[in-house]
Image (spheres, rainbow, N blue to C red):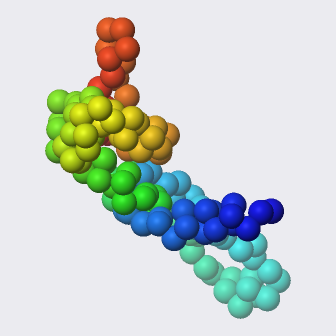
Amino acid sequence: MRISHKRKVQLKLQKRVMATVAVAKPAAAKAVKKAPTAETVKAAPAAKPVEKQQPAPAAAVATQVSLTPKQQAVLDIVVTHAEGINPKGIGLQAGQEEAKAASWATGALKKLAEEGLVERIQLAGNKVLYKAV
């Protein structure tokens, strides 16, 4: 592996920021049951059966998603516009020049759409709006 490539990878890893996002997580992964052994059966012959736990609501469970500062800024702008906003509008809100505003926001929007944080809405032709989920 080339040294310059290693440096670029390390710089990208250092730019990562952790952001909390509410995402459903299976509750069954938390509860791990052990099989009863002969010693535990002898020690507790009158043990009660274990009751099943109710799964937690999806909104209450949070997971960590790694976002760069640029992606976090784009997510904040999209969240403030509940009716939806196009990539050029996002770039202009972030202080970019008009000529490169849309291309500046597109990369971050793709990542956010893959993570399920932003919904992509295709309008007529090549027009696209992004809404927070």
Q: Going 42% across and 66% down the picture, which residue do you hit? A: 17
Q: Quadrant of residue 9?
A: bottom right
In the rendering, at what x and y percent does residue 73 appear? 29, 53
Q: Quarter of the image containing the N terminus?
A: bottom right
- Residue 25 location in percent, x, y? 49, 55
Q: Nearer the viewer, residue 124 or 41?
A: 124
Q: How many marks?
A: 0
Quick check: 112 above or below 65? Answer: above
Q: Nearer the viewer, residue 117 or 99?
A: 99
Left or right of 30? Residue 5 is right
Where is residue 63 drawn, in percent x and y? Answer: 44, 61
Which residue is at the front of the view, 106 or 133?
106
Q: Quadrant of residue 100?
A: top left
Q: Is residue 77 visible?
A: no
Q: Residue at x 47, y 65 (%)?
A: 16
Above or below, 83 against 30 in this view is above
Question: Would residue 15 be seen by someone viewing this image from the given angle?
Answer: yes
Instruction: Determine whether, in the image, residue 66 is placed left or right of residue 126.
Output: right
Rendering coords of residue 119 (x, y %): 36, 33
- Look at the image and tell me in which quarter the C terminus lies: top left
Residue 13 vertical placement versus 127 (above, below)? below
Residue sitting at the far top: 124
**Image point 73% across, 68% down: which residue?**
3
Q: What residue lies at 33% left-to-right and 22% top-to-bottom?
A: 128
